[in-house]
Every structure is written in C-alpha cells, then in structure tokens.
Amino acid sequence: MEAESVKLLEFTLKGKEIGHKIYFLGKIDSTQNYALCLLQNFRASLHGAVIIAKEQSNGRGRMGRKWISQPGGLWMSVILEKCLTTKRIPIIQFISSLAVADSISKLTGLECKTKWPNDLLLGGKKICGVIVDVGFEGNKPTHAIIGIGLNANFEARSIAELGNQIIVSRVTTLRDELGNDTDLVKLTKLILERLEYYYSQLKEDKIKAIVDEWKKRSDFFGRLVRVEDGKKNFQGIAIGVDENGFLEIRLPDGSVQRVIFGDLGLSNL
Ligand code: BTN
C-alpha cells in the first residue's frame, strides 16, 4: 500500500461516514495507541477516521497478547464516536468481523469462518483478529476504536522466523491461501464500505440480525468446545451467542454457562 493510493482511497470515501479521513503511517507502535492519542489531543470530531500502518512495533492483540505486524499485513484502526450505547458496544466486534469476511469473499472468493469472539479463520487457521477498545464517561461510551489485524501479503512461516514458533501452526495469510498477493487498497475500501453498512444496521439496533449473520459463518455451534476464560478451563457444547455478545455453552450437567471473555477452541476429546 502506498501513500498516493491511500489518498485516492480517502478521496473516493469522501462523503461517507467511515474512511473520510485516513492517517497512513510507516512504522508505529500500534494503530490503536495512535488512535487513542489522536482522541486525547484533537478537539475536532474523529468519528469515522481510519489509521493504517505499514508495520507495528507493538501491535496489541486481545487478552494482553502481542500482535505480530510485519510489512504486508493490513493493520488498521477505525474510530467511532457517534451513536454508541452500552447495548451496541459488544456487537461492534461482530460487525467488524463481518465487514472483513464479506470483503475477503468479494475480492478473493475465500470464505472465512467466524470464531467467537472476534477471529476469522480459513481452514481452521487464524487470518484476522479484531480488538475493540472503548472509552467511557461514567457509564456512557464516548468512543470505540476498532483494531483490525489481517494477515495478508506475507507468509505465516515468516512469523516463525520472527520468533513465534508456537502460534505459526495456527495462523494463515492471504498469500498462503491464494499463492499471490492481494490489492490491499481495494480490500481496505471494501472493508470500510461494509463496515459502514453494518454500522448503519447497528444504529438501527438490528442486533439479532447481525448476530445471526455472524453465527451463520461459524462452524463451532453444536460442537464440543473448550473455553478458557482467564480463570478456568471448561468444556461443553457451543449453543449460541446472545444479544449481549455472550457465548452460551451447555455444560455436561445440562446448565448453560454464559461467557463474556475468553478463548474458544474445538475440544480434542
Ligand atoms: C486479536 O486477535 O487478538 C486482535 C488483534 C488485533 C490486531 C490489530 S492490528 C491493528 C490494530 N492495532 C493494534 O495494536 N492491534 C490492532
């Protein structure tokens, strides 16, 4: 991705809510941190602003994990400041994943699967992760920063070369899947347009429709899964996701455990 094509992209998205302003940077620590810094230092509205970096030195994943962000990936944050309610906040991760999945499908024909809470998988391997950082004043959400990390134009095995042997077997990239590189400007345009579409659905509180759409793309439901919620590990059948974004697991004793935070995997029993 080059600066001129990003300028052109910004121009084509003028008049839209999301993407009318794009900050395109070389190597920074994290687009999430950069977005937060903008919010803390700018008086003007940043609603719909997008931050894209070629490379991140300290990319952040969920649960305090490091997100390896070498050149060739799509490392992007989107700022939302309008129409945020506590009910809508947990659904932002689903609209973001859906926007990316639709766009990958349209541009490449690859059909990603969703994995609770915010991963996209191809062939069972992670291709994209989403993080949503939210700011509050009292109980009221004031901003949400959507962070999208999409493994695109590099090989997963290069992550191992960067020293992360363990995760590499569970990771894939667009280059690994397609055998060639993807036009990241086109992909970003599609993602921002789909995000605008799903955000308009969210503003109309079509939460059930969004969650149902997200669930349709998951193959975890009805299967025996293992959940690590930071405190304990347990197994059960994944039966659904409610309108608050909680994962519902039927435990062996028949009761239903609702999970708001954690990691999900298929059980190997
Ligand atoms: C996860 O799966 O744990 C979420 C990963 C999110 C990574 C993206 S890359 C762009 C943005 N900036 C960051 O520091 N993190 C997110």
Image (tube, helix red, strand yellow):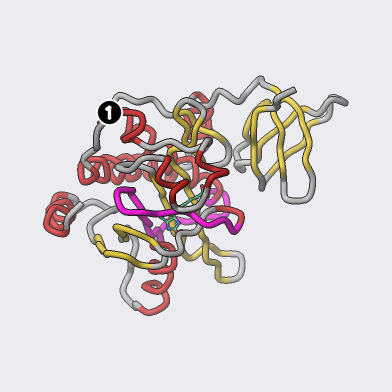
Q: Residue at x 34, y 62 (%)?
A: 47
Residue 81 on the magenta segment: yes
Q: Is residue 188 left or right of residue 75?
A: left
Snapshot quadrant of residue 111: top left
Snapshot quadrant of residue 99: top left
Q: Which residue is mark 1?
A: 108
Q: Residue at x 61, y 65 (%)?
A: 139
Q: Secondary structure at mark 1?
A: helix
Magenta stretch in the rendered image: 64-89
Can you give x and y, in whole percent of width and height, for residue 12 in the image?
A: 14, 49
In the picture shown, does residue 125 fall above or below 15? Answer: above
Instruction: Look at the image and tell me whether residue 25 can be seen.
Output: yes
Can you give x and y, in whole percent of width and height, for residue 76 in the image?
A: 35, 54
In the picture shown, does residue 16 fall above or below 268? Answer: below
Q: Residue at x 57, y 49 (%)?
A: 87
Q: Residue at x 44, y 59 (%)?
A: 145
